[in-house]
Image: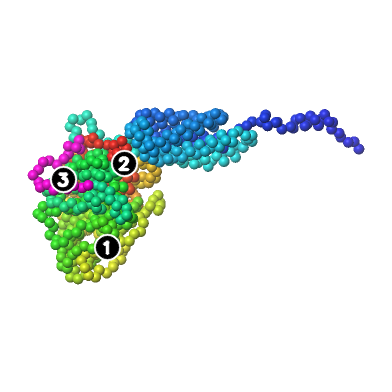
Amino acid sequence: MTTSRVSAATVAGMSTDLRIPPIAARELRYSPVGLAGAALLTAGAAFIHLAVVPEHLDEYPLFGVFFLVVGLVQLAAALAVALTPNRPRLLAVAAGTLALVAVWVGSRTVGLPVGPEPWEPEPVGVPDVLCEALQLMSLAVLGGLIARGPRVRVGHPARTALAAAPIALLVAAATFAGAGAGLSGMPEAFSAAPASADPAGTPVTALVAPPSAAPVKAFTLTARTEVIGGQLAYTYNGTVPGPELRVAQGDRVRVTLVNELPVATTLHWHGVRVPNAEDGVAGLTQDAVAPGQSFVYDFVAADAGTFWYHSHQDTGNQIPAGLFGALVVEPSGGRVAEDVEHTVLLHNGPADTHAVGVNGTTGDLALPARPGQRVRLRIIDAVSPEMDGAAEAPVLVGAPYQVVALDGHDITGPELLGPQRLALGMGQRVDLVFTMPASGAVRLVDSRIPGTPSALQGFFGSPRRADETVTLGSGAPPAAVDLVHLPVFDPLRYGVAGPDPDTGPAAMTAPVVLGERPGFHDGAIQLVHSINTFASPDVPPITVHFGQLVRLHLVNNTGEFHPMHLHGHVMSVLDVDGRTPLGSPPRLDTVLLWPRQSIDVAFLADNPGIWMLHCHVLVHASMGMSMTVNYVGITTPFTMGSRSGNVAE
């Protein structure tokens, strides 16, 4: 047998060929996942900084240039970290990021020494919070890379990509949200009707009540804070609601608003056909009244009826906080014919905005009335509903009644009714007249009709709450009724048909299509509420000429209620889902659209100005469901936006 032998030289040669190189000769690298994460986080912050450049250029050019330079430098830093990392570069990127975080903290706490308002802290918004979150995470990753240093790495591209994927998704989502919010931020200064070179143009400030010999009714409303129900409230003259203002038709009404609040505010006269300069819309007809300042509103009460007043600055916060009250205009011949008259103002509870209060109380409100007396109830819906826009639905039980007025406008030939639900959107009013029974009490029970939340709304529908009541008279209360199954009052089939001043041929028809979609608005991620696919302030206005009869085709493509309120005018309801009025023509300033409903209305363009047309569900208006009706030749010197501080909704 022959044995094969391997020489020592051969073994030595094999040993030399298979030897692993020494560590000093191997490549040392930083963690690929860490580098990818730091680069992505830095780039995400860069894109958010670049997205807010236009906004800051308008606000203060130096800030705009600063954000442009920062964004570009951060993009370059991200590339350097990803492609050519070394300790000095990582330290430089970390130091720069830390400096940016420190500047942001200073700007939000003590303010900066430069800018439009030196040493005034800036508000915190969605874009900057997301940007700072990305920068803080990048600091953490950069710190880990610097502390651990480069190490021997075995390349696994697929494993690296898989490990970096969660970071990439997180950065992509935060960058999309931050940049989207930054690009859709509240405008610095938006004018609904800017002045032009046309010498024939008329500013809204010139649209005032002419001098007259009418009797003057003067009031002072002081807006100030008070603790009510254990909660800090905004009040007029220390109460919620504010004091009822009562005047006669034809009176000259002069109201001085004194602002002792810590924020700016205004007064709007809901449903009253005032001259445009007195409409009280911040950024449209005036600048909001600053803390410590005052403003005088002066107009003639042209129409008798039930109206109300409220702030039209930051309405989504100021009305629920307490800035509202009733305005009653009695007929020129004196008080109404009824023996007893009560105003019932429904509103959010002082301590719980999900509850409903009545005239400043919660629970049952007792009002005086004697057997046999004729009673008028002026019901005002000032309840700010949740996302579904749930309509209030008061029901009168214990006596037959008549609906004698809607939105302050009389109904011809009102008929007696039994218990029905009176669907009211926020801002609407209804006057009821009835005779007290020989014995027992009459009760008004406030229920609600919720909308149908869409898949996009999820759980944003109105929470359940107890039904509030108002009891008139003494004695046994009326028997309870099944509110849910009661019929809903139909204004199209009520009263006696008669002539309507707004049923002639219209000079124009304008669509007003209401929709919703997830997106960005005013620097935040929202369920954007739109008119004709746009959200305020980008909704194109409806432009009218004085004297035109204008028809609006209102279409609700959502599952929510939308009470659409037109300032300064009265609308005639012409058609509801193909049904035309057979009774007294409904005349309204706030039209309630039920889910998926369409309504045609008409109004006479007889009050020049720049007028708001918006949903009176306050959260819907703040999310974009607002526009204007602009008369040709009318301009405004006022602007809405962060620079002026005028925020109408």
Between 456 and 261, which is closer to the camera in this rendering? 261
Q: What whole-number distance in Å separates the C-alpha atoms at marks 3 and 2? A: 32 Å
For the residue labelled by badge 1, is the local secondary structure a helix, a strand or a loop? strand
Question: Which amino acid does the dot numbered 1 rest on?
Answer: Asp
Q: What crowding class fits label 2: few (fewer than 14 Cα within 10 Å), some (14-19), or many (20 or more)?
A: many
Residue sitting at x 14%, y 62%: 339
Find residue 75 and report its horizontal and vertical position in percent. 48, 31
Between 54 and 576, which is closer to the camera in this rendering? 54
Which quadrant is home to the N terminus?
top right
Q: Is residue 219 magenta?
A: yes
Mark closer to the observer (3, 2)? 3
Find residue 449 and report its horizontal and vertical position in percent. 31, 58
Tags 3 and 1 touching, CB below 8 Å: no
For the residue labelled by badge 3, is the local secondary structure a helix, a strand or a loop? strand
Q: Is residue 385 magenta?
A: no
Q: Label 3, on which residue?
A: 254
Q: Label 2, on which residue?
A: 536
For the residue labelled by badge 2, is the local secondary structure a helix, a strand or a loop? loop
Find residue 57 and report its horizontal and vertical position in percent. 36, 31
Tags 3 and 2 touching, CB below 8 Å: no
Going from N to C along the chain, the mark reached first, 2 or 1, is 1
Going from N to C along the chain, the mark reached first, 3 or 2, is 3
Question: Which amino acid does the dot numbered 3 rest on?
Answer: Arg
In the image, residue 61 above or below residue 373 = above
Range drawn in magenta: 203-222
Residue sitting at x 9%, y 43%: 212
Quarter of the image for residue 390 reads bottom left
